[in-house]
Image (cartoon, rainbow, N blue to C red):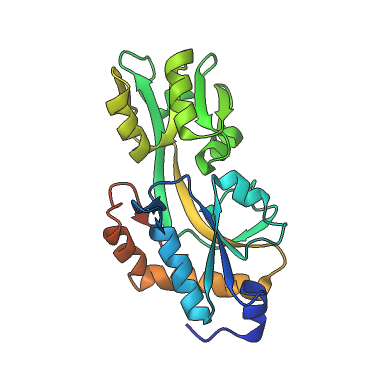
Amino acid sequence: MIAASPAVLADLAPTGKLRAGINFSNFLLTAREPDGTPRGVALDLAHELGRRLGVPTEIVEFPNPGKLAESADKGIWDVGFLGAEPARAVLIDFSAAYVEIEATYLVRDGSPLKSIADVDREGVTVVVPAKAAYGLWLAANLKQAKLTGVDMADTAARRFVAENFDALAGLKDRLTQDVQKIPGTHLIPGQFAAVQQAAGTPKGRPAGNAYLCDFIEDVKASGLVAKLIDRHDVGHGLTVAPPR
C-alpha cells in the first residue's frame, strides 16, 4: 500500500491518533486476557492500520455493535470494526468484509422446524439479539415468523428457554456452545446468513474510506487475516471473506 496522504490522515486520524471503535460482544473477534487486556482479530487489525498510518491506535470499546453504529456521527471514533448492514450504512461507509461468520438457528429436539426455510412461517417465534448484524438481517428479511429482539446473546438464550420460543437465532459458533448448555436442542443445518464483518468510517471521510477499503483488501490478500484467525484459534467460526 502507498503511504497515507495528508487527506487520509485528516480523515482517519484527525486527533493525531487512530480511534478504533470495537464491538466487544463478538467473542470470535474480540476477547480479553485474564488481566483484562483486550485481544482478538479486530484489535490486531486496528493496530496494524494505525501502524501503517504512522499514528498511535486508541481502542474505543463498545458493548455491542448497535452502540458502535449509533455513535458514528458523534465524533468519538474514526474507524469502526463491525458487521456491515444496510441499516448501519446510513451513518457509516463500509469496506468489503474481511471475515464472514455463519448465522443459523437453535431449536428443540422434535421441533417441526427442519430447515432454514421452515422458520419463516406464520406462528413461528424467534428470539435474537436485535442489534447484531444477523438480527438486523432477520428484521429485514423474515416475512411471516414473529421476531423478538433482545439486547444480547445471553439474554436471547435465557428467554428461549424461559418463554418457549420456537427458535433461537445466533452465530453458529455461539449456538454450538448453547446446545451443550440447553439439553434437548440442536442446530438447524445450513445458515440463514453469512454475517459480513467489515470496517467503516463515519460518513463524509472519502479519502480515509478509500484508504481503509484498500487496507482491508490488502490484509486479506496478503494472508494477514488468515494468520490472525489461526493466532487467536477462531477458525471454527470465522472464514476469510472473498476479495472485493
| Point 56% across, 29% down: residue | 150
Q: Quadrant of residue 143?
A: top right
* Residue 41 vertical position relative to residue 213 in the rendered view, above or below: above
As rendered, which of 85 and 71 lies closer to the eye?
A: 71
Residue farthest toward the front in the current orientation of the protein: 35
* Residue 208 vertical position relative to residue 176 in the rendered view, above or below: below
Q: Quadrant of residue 137?
A: top right
| Point 48% across, 53% down: residue | 197
Residue 125 x, y percent position in the rendering: 51, 18
Say whether residue 229 is left or right of residue 47.
left
As rendered, which of 56 and 175 lies closer to the eye?
A: 56
Q: How many marks are shown on the rendered structure?
A: 0
* Residue 73 vertical position relative to residue 57 in the rendered view, above or below: above
| Point 33% across, 51% down: residue | 34
Q: Quadrant of residue 194?
A: top left
Q: Determine if residue 241 is in view.
A: no
Residue 170 x, y percent position in the rendering: 43, 35
Residue 38 x, y percent position in the rendering: 42, 57
* Residue 156 vertical position relative to residue 95 in the rendered view, above or below: above
Q: Determine if residue 224 is in view.
A: yes
Say whether residue 16 is left or right of residue 44.
right
| Point 56% across, 25% down: residue | 147
Residue 242 x, y percent position in the rendering: 40, 60
